[in-house]
Amino acid sequence: MLFLSFVVLFFLGISLLYFTYSSTPRTNLPDERQEHVIAPKPAPEIELSIHEHPAVELESTENRVVNEQEEVQEQGEAPRVIEPQNLEQVWLPINPTPELADLKPKSQAVTDIQAIEFENIDQFRVLMAGDSATLPLPNGESIRVLIDEAQTQAQGIQTWAGNFETQGGTFPVTFTFGQHSIMGFIGHPQGSIKIEGVGHQAWVYQVPDSHGFEHDTQSHDRAH
């Protein structure tokens, strides 16, 4: 009987402990459960910010490229079109080199011949309509040529034509530039003036109006 009472008391004690534990408020639970639930929440925000960031960079890059292209267009060839060139000193007299001496005209009709060197042949050969150039002639006269038209032909041959005024009239000027050769004509009223050379050197000489380009054929071939 004593043993049975002991067993009953034992189970009553266990039941009391169980109900006491079950009635404990959940607010007293350890903090680990709350931290475990809250931790994953920031993840979606980080992922979205990563995807949004390149779009901003691409837009700024495109804007920068457009701005650079606009600056290039503003600083490009516009000044060349708006402001014509004016070459004040195209060539200077020189002592002929052996190569230039081989190109000297042989005709007895040639007068006032002079060897010259161009100051800037690359600039002189690409003159365009509206540009001008001052050419010193062997007789001491200087003429101002106004270019009317310019053309680039096959194999890089460049030609421009213009006119100058003297003695109350207007007279023609033409120049043709090959890869190496230079040929020019000035229709001066006192006699035609012709230019023939190679590279950046040439002969300037005067001939009667009825006289054409009479020069050694082999010399002309070497000039090209």
Image (cartoon, rainbow, N blue to C red):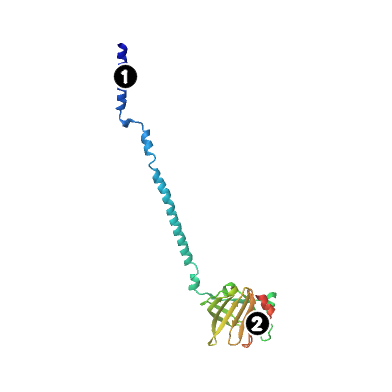
Q: Amino acid at mark 2?
A: Ile
- Of the pair 126 and 191, the residue shown nearer to us: 126
Height in image: 209 above or below 25? below
- Mark 2 and mark 1: span between their CA atoms? 140 Å
Q: Position of residue 76 (x, y in %)?
A: 50, 67
Q: Position of residue 196 (x, y in %)?
A: 64, 79
Identify the mark nearer the N-term, 2 or 1.
Answer: 1
Quadrant housing residue 98: bottom right
Q: Dot 1: within a 10 Å radius of its alpha carbon, few (fewer than 14), some, or many (20 or more) residues?
A: few
Tally of numbered tags: 2
Height in image: 16 above or below 134? above
Residue occupied by mark 2: 113
Q: Position of residue 167 (x, y in %)?
A: 55, 87
Q: If the image is split into quadrants, where does the C terminus sit?
A: bottom right
User: Which residue shows up at 47% across the image and 62% down it?
Assistant: 68
Q: Amino acid at mark 1?
A: Phe
* Residue 97 seen by the camera: no
User: Which residue shows up at 53% across the image and 78% down it?
Assistant: 149
Asked if disc 2 and disc 1 are in contact, CB closer than 8 Å, the reply is: no
* Residue 55 seen by the camera: yes
Q: Dot 2: within a 10 Å radius of its alpha carbon, few (fewer than 14), some, or many (20 or more) residues?
A: some
Instruction: Report the side of 195 relative to 4 (left or right).
Output: right
Q: Which mark is residue 11?
A: 1
- Of the pair 59 and 82, the residue shown nearer to us: 59
Q: Position of residue 125 (x, y in %)?
A: 58, 75
User: Which residue shows up at 55% across the image and 80% down it?
Assistant: 161
Q: Secondary structure at mark 2?
A: strand
Instruction: Report the side of 208 relative to 12 (left or right).
Output: right
Q: If the image is split into quadrants, where does the N terminus sit?
A: top left
Quadrant housing residue 155: bottom right
